[in-house]
Image (spheres, helix red, strand yellow):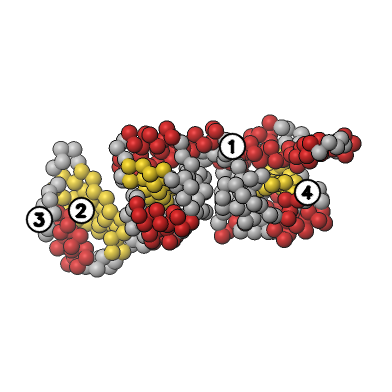
Amino acid sequence: MLFLISDVFSEDAQQRLRGAGHDVRYEPALKGAELTAALAEMQPQVLVVRSTKVTEADLDAAPALELVVRAGAGVDTIDVGAASRRGVFVANCPGKNSAAVAELAMGLLLALDRRIPDNVAQARAGHWDKAGFSKASGLKGRTLGLVGFGSIGREVAARAQAFGMRVVVWSRSLDDETAAEAGVERMESPLALAGVADAVSVHVASTPDTRGLLDAAFFDALRPGGLVINTARDIVIDEAAMRRAIEEKGVRVATDVPPNEPAVKEGPFDYDLARNDAFYVTHHIGASTDEATDAIGAEALRVVLAYADTGSAPNVVNLADRTPATHLLTVRHLDRVGVLAAVLAEARRAGWNVQEMENVVFAGAEAACARIRFDGAPDAGALDRIRAVEHVLNATVMGL
């Protein structure tokens, strides 16, 4: 298979792909129109990216493309809808950078509380201010609120507990039993969480449901002087509400995902809040540790090798949870050439739209069983014609 890797990817993983007989094109600088042109020229079966955006135009340019792998946790940089409409699998590498992001979140929490970046900046500028920088709340005994409790949120909770913090959590999927096992307290809503937290760390995926999740009501409920850490995505915070909270309530914020961050690895950056003493910005480096890079690379390699070997990729995110199938056709048949082709011809004649299909072969390869889920109206005539197909042993239909 032909693989195009358009982001940083370990040399060892590349060599393993080549060693398995695959053609690997490593072009980590490809972005935008250059990526579109490369896809059109190379026509790879597999595209591996990390932070690079994959657009509908990219997918249009590469009709041979079968799989896009994001070497990271989310897939918001990929037009998943466009991929689904073209029958292209999209997979990711969830959970492999959780520890790295959690470490940064805790680092930002400590930095906000102790004003570490400002300490360093003042010292480098030749100014000593022990009195000014000696004021801090400390973390022990304080309450940390986690918005989201996936793999990253769980890692943050464990570290915060080690610092002696009380941890409260809101997550749509969290139940009381899971919360008790993790030693955290479940909150009914983000608003309820904001009302009791001294600091809040955000760990939700970027979806339409999470856009502006930390809204004006959330910041109104947050305690004066509260701390907010965002290592998720910028859209989860209502920026206007956040700005008001900084100005009017003394809230302090640290983010690894500023709005309109540059698409390039290095270049100009102009964001007015970055010059505000109450706002810390890091350079979207949450997953950028050697440990996380190696783990993500290994998982991305596992995904693409599994697809190359079996045609089935782990971690695919764009398969239907439930198809429109209304009935299940089960056909027991001899393992002979053309049997299923004839069965499907009868399904087409009956106007049945096949949604899912599998065929399992019994030991000895004499007989097999096909299960075909379809959307349509079954009738006795169609079923009789299928039973009459040569080498069909029996056929049944049941509603789903």
**Dots 1, 2 in contact, CB < 8 A:** no
**Which amino acid is tagged 1?**
Ala
**Separation of marks 4 and 1 at Cα, in angstroms:** 24 Å
Tell me the quarter of the image containing the C terminus.
bottom left
Query: Splitting the image into 4 quarters, where does residue 16 fall?
Result: top left
Does residue 383 lie above or below 150 as drawn? below
Q: Secondary structure at mark 4?
A: loop
Amino acid type indicated by mark 2 = Val
* Horizontal arrangement in the rendering, residue 133 relative to residue 43 (left or right): right
Tell me if label 4 and label 1 are in contact, CB under 8 Å. no
Which residue is rendered at x = 68% and y = 31% of the image? 162
Measured Cα–Cα span from mark 3 to mark 2:
12 Å
Q: What is the total number of numbered labels drawn onto the structure image?
A: 4
Res 331 label: 2
- Which is in the foreground here, disc 3 or disc 4? 4
Residue highlighted by disc 3 = 390
Quote the CA–CA distance across marks 3 and 4: 77 Å
Separation of residues labelled 1 and 2 (CA atoms):
50 Å
Disc assigned to residue 278: 4
**Which residue is at a point 76% across and 44% down the rendered structure image?**
198
Left or right of 112, for residue 33: left
Among the two numbered marks 2 and 4 on one chain, the one whose residue lies closer to the N terminus = 4
Residue 240 got which mark? none
Q: Secondary structure at mark 2?
A: strand
Which amino acid lies under the numbered mark 4 shown in the image of this protein? Answer: Ala
